């Protein structure tokens, strides 16, 4: 079991690295890179700046909670709002079984903090329907 947890943690870290590298190669040039650094960002698990990420790992290291297919409708110096999927590993019968459930969700990043990496959002509130009931959860975002 310890080795499967290590594999999941390693997979989550590698996914974060690949996402970062992939976003660097999607046509961002040095001319617009300085513009991006002035935008408010979310910091990823490896402290990388992420502006309008299409997916984001919550609970760094486990990969148990992820937001995916994110379409941001607002991204400014007050908050960011978007829609997408909130994916949860039910950990049935164990977390390593990867029994994932995806819920349609709305996202609200809020609370701005100044860091050495620039301005970043501090929290992400996720609202989703679970068994017909509206549920909200707020995650603290890095740096903690």
Image (tube, helix red, strand yellow):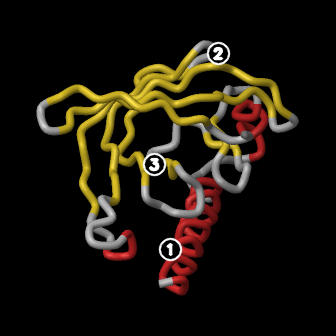
The residue drawn where x is 62% and y is 38% is 141
User: What numbered label is drawn on residue 55?
Assistant: 3
| Residue 130 left/right relative to 14 | left
Work out which residue is located at the far left of the displayed protein and give it: 132
Residue 77: image tag: 2
The residues bearing labels 2 and 3 have C-alpha atoms spaced at a distance of 20 Å
Q: Give x and y (percent) for residue 81.
A: 44, 23
Name the spot of residue 11 as percent of width and height, x first. Answer: 53, 73
Residue 89, image x and y in percent?
Answer: 34, 59
Q: CA distance from mark 3 to mark 1?
A: 17 Å
Q: Is residue 71 above or below residue 111?
A: below
Q: Secondary structure at mark 3?
A: loop
Q: Nearer the viewer, mark 2 or mark 1?
A: 1
Q: Could you tell me which residue is drawn at 32 percent across and 75 percent down?
A: 97
Q: Secondary structure at mark 2?
A: loop
Between 13 and 39, the residue placed more toward the observer is 13
Q: Which of the pair 29/100 is nearer the observer? A: 100
**Circle 2/circle 1 CB separation < 8 Å:** no
Tag 1 residue: 8
Instruction: Choose between 123 and 52: the one closer to the eye.
Output: 123
Dot 1, how many residues are within 10 Å of its Cα: few (below 14), some (14-19), or many (20+)? Answer: some
> Residue pushed farthest right?
116
Q: In terms of sequence position, does the residue under pointer 2 or pointer 3 come before the other?
A: 3
For label 2, count other residues whose C-alpha is less than 10 Å away and answer few (under 14), some (14-19) or many (20+).
some
Mark 3 / mark 1, whichever is N-terminal? 1
Which residue is located at x 71 percent, y 37 percent? 32
Nearer-the-camera pick, 127 or 25? 127
Secondary element at tag 1: helix
**Mark sitting on residue 56:** none
Task: Classify 4 as above or below 109.
Answer: below
């Amino acid at each position: 079991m310890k080795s499967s947890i290590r594999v999941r943690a390693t997979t989550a870290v590698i996914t974060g690295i690949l996402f970062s590298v992939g976003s660097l190669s999607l046509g961002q040039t040095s001319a617009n890179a300085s513009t991006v650094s002035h935008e408010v960002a979310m910091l990823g698990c490896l402290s990388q700046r992420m502006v309008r990420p299409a997916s984001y790992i919550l609970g760094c290291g486990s990969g148990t909670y992820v937001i995916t297919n994110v379409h941001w409708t607002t991204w400014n110096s007050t908050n960011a709002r978007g829609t997408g999927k909130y994916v949860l590993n039910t950990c049935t019968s164990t977390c390593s079984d990867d029994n994932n459930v995806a819920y349609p969700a709305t996202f609200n990043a809020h609370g701005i903090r100044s860091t050495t990496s620039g301005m970043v959002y501090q929290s992400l509130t996720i609202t989703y329907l679970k068994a017909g009931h509206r549920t909200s959860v707020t995650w603290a975002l890095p740096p903690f």
